[in-house]
Amino acid sequence: MDNNEPEDILIEEQVDTQIIVKAYPDLKALFTLFFVLLFYTLIVGAIEGVFIINTQGVHLPLLESFFTMVGYVMALLLTIRYAVKKSKKQQEASSFNFSFNKIQGWLVPLVIISTLALVVGLERVSNFIPMSDATQHFFERMIKKDPFSIITVVIAAPILEEILCRGVILKGLLKNYSPYKAILISAIFFGVIHMNPWQALPAFCGGLFLGWVFYKTQSVIPGMFIHMTINATASMFLFLPKNKQGFSELFGEPYYIILCIFSALIFISGCVLIHKKALPLLSISPNNTINY
């Protein structure tokens, strides 16, 4: 027994001193990632500004929107590239999976219907913070109705932001923290990157739903449909008269109250179905049991 004792102690010491490598990102890394995104946004924005200034002699709003779209896409792609490189380096992996996992077919219409119901609530949330006339005028000048702006909002933003915020960030956070904490942190980050409180608050609330759906399905695909539905609905209101750009103004009382109640019931029902029926398909074994 005495001869084996030193060996046992050595093994215990090796276990105790074993370094546990965290997945990327943790809270500290996420803080840095925000400034990386901000840096790329400013750099690309400066380059975009040079192109716009050079074409200022000929006022082409459509060309400006094209530059804005390209700049936005480049900033997000560079940030995603940075995050993926950090993730692969930290976990010593040669490849990275963005979680484009297959989903159950019925999930697509379900998340779209649930999101349409959620949008009614998100509109109320966005009105919690009063907006000054100057700020409202600023947003009216910034928001455009041309094809490139619509593509940026409805297609590019949902795809790239879901890859970054859920496919990279939340995926890593779920390995470091409890699901509730990981989803909350990712939703806060998602709200903060919108850079203003009028978009950040509804983005945070929508981010909680997006994060939860990602956790249930282990796929960024449902989130992209959710994100597209939110942004497309907001974009559609731009084409309505100014006094009709909101559910309360569009429907009026008491129909708006009925809409809110009906939407809440639809959204809750959708969440219940997702909770009970949604499965990460790539994790289903041949005998229909889920392997985590």
Image (cartoon, rainbow, N blue to C red):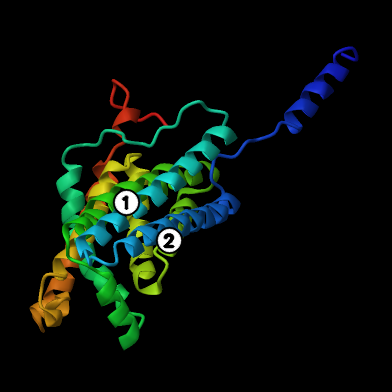
- Residue at horizontal 29 percent and vertical 81 percent from the top: 136
Q: Is residue 238 left or right of residue 203?
A: left
Front tag of 2 and 1: 1
Above or below, comparing residue 188 to residue 138 in the picture: above
Q: Farthest front residue?
A: 57
Question: Residue 246: x, y in percent?
Answer: 17, 76
Residue 66 seen in the current view: yes
Question: Residue 12: x, y in percent?
Answer: 78, 26
- Residue at horizontal 46 percent and vertical 58 percent from the top: 189
Q: What separation in Å lies between label 2 and label 1 (alpha carbons)? A: 18 Å
Instruction: Specify which label sits upstream in the sequence, 2 or 1.
Output: 1
Question: Disc 2 marks which amino acid?
Answer: Ile
Q: Is residue 70 left or right of residue 233?
A: right
Q: Between 70 and 126, which is closer to the camera in this rendering?
A: 70
Question: Disc 1 marks which amino acid?
Answer: Val
Q: Secondary structure at mark 1?
A: helix
Disc marking residue 70: 1
- Within 10 angstroms of label 1, few (less than 14), some, or many (20 or more) residues? some
| The C terminus, quarter of image | top left
Disc marking residue 137: none
Q: Between 242 and 8, which is closer to the camera in this rendering?
A: 242
Question: Which residue carries the number 2 mark?
Answer: 193
Question: Residue 185: x, y in percent?
Answer: 48, 56
Dividing the picture into quadrants, the one containing residue 232 is: bottom left
Above or below, comparing residue 197 to residue 65 in the picture: below
- Residue at horizontal 32 percent and vertical 36 percent from the top: 100
- Residue at horizontal 10 percent and vertical 78 percent from the top: 241
Residue 269 seen in the current view: no
Dividing the picture into quadrants, the one containing residue 234 is: bottom left
Question: Residue 229: x, y in percent?
Answer: 20, 56
State the count of labels. Answer: 2
